[in-house]
Amino acid sequence: MSLLTVRDLKVSYGGIEALKGISFDVDEKKIVTLIGANGAGKSTTLRAISGLVPIKAGAITFEGRDITSLDTSQIVAQGVVLVPEGRRVFPNLTVLENLKIGAYLRRDQAEIKKATEYVFERFPRLEERHWQMAGTLSGGEQQMLAVGRALMARPRLLMMDEPSLGLAPLVVRDIFTIIHRLSEEGMTILLIEQNANAALRAADTAYVMETGRITMTGTGEELLNNQAIRDAYLGTKRVRKPKVPDAADTTASPTTQSIPATDPSA
Ligand SMILES: Nc1ncnc2c1ncn2[C@@H]1O[C@H](COP(=O)(O)OP(=O)(O)O)[C@@H](O)[C@H]1O
Ligand SMILES: [Mg+2]
């Protein structure tokens, strides 16, 4: 069943159309990813769903209800929560204080305590460091905190804007482990990534965005195996040192050699 539907969504910044009428669905309990180059409109899509940028045309429904014209806190109250790009934790507040901000719509102290326990159970690291100033956490820990803060609102749809950006490979793996665990527990996830490889491997459904349009869709696996996607987004054109450089080539830098994507060993 479709939890979120986006239909013919258009967003402009000044005179520039960043979204030129995009439509897609996010089914319940699935991981859906939007991939695409820098500037394609991925962040704008999530910001529009969250009510953070004005919508010029189109409709967004969540659980069958029209949320197109709701404001951000009403959208959060419906259960649609964004982990923004760049982590954006409050550096001069503690981990616990940052988490409590994520529960800003809740008045009930018992509910807040339950939400905190829910987050600490999934991120033991945050519990260990609950007293620490968020600005002194590592990049990976700050990303965990940003996710934890979103979870404090007990979302039904968790939207994540490039959670792996700028993180070391091992930390990226931890982030994707969390994404999988949340998904297994029944969370619906809309993930946007420039790290198309990791995103497609995680995704049930994927959409490719190019300059404000959706140009392709399929399962994560289908897009991983699609040659055009591999060439454009997955860096399959490997650069490597030739085994036996021929005489004419000895002056060429080995790192500038590219192997076509059709190379059987690629
Ligand atoms: N606040 C803004 N003001 C003006 N243009 C913007 C703003 N935010 C994004 N854009 C433009 O909208 C387009 C889509 O940007 P964005 O949604 O951030 O792409 P992505 O997240 O895929 O990298 C880009 O051309 C970008 O320059
Ligand atoms: Mg972006």
Image: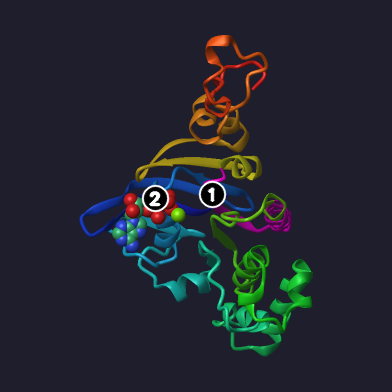
Tag 2: amino acid: Gly
- Secondary structure under badge 1? strand
- Secondary structure under badge 2? loop
Measuring 31% from the left and 64% from the top, which residue is drawn there? 54
Tag 1: amino acid: Glu
- Mark 1 lies within 8 Å of ligand 2 (Cβ measured): no
Q: Residue furthest left?
A: 15
Quadrant containing ligand 1 reads bottom left
Which labelled disc corresponds to residue 163?
A: none
**Mark 1 and mark 2: Cα distance apart in space:** 11 Å
**In what quadrant of the picture does the C terminus appear?**
top right
Question: Taking 209 as reference, is 230 left or right?
Answer: right
> Where, by quadrant of the figure, is residue 79 drawn?
bottom right
Which labelled disc corresponds to residue 193?
A: 1
Q: Where is 201 relative to 258, above or below?
A: below
Q: Earlier in the sequence, mark 1 or mark 2?
A: 2
Q: Which residues are magenta?
A: 173-195
Q: Position of residue 18 (x, y in %)?
A: 32, 51
Which labelled disc corresponds to residue 41?
A: 2
Measuring 66% from the left and 13% from the top, which residue is drawn there? 244
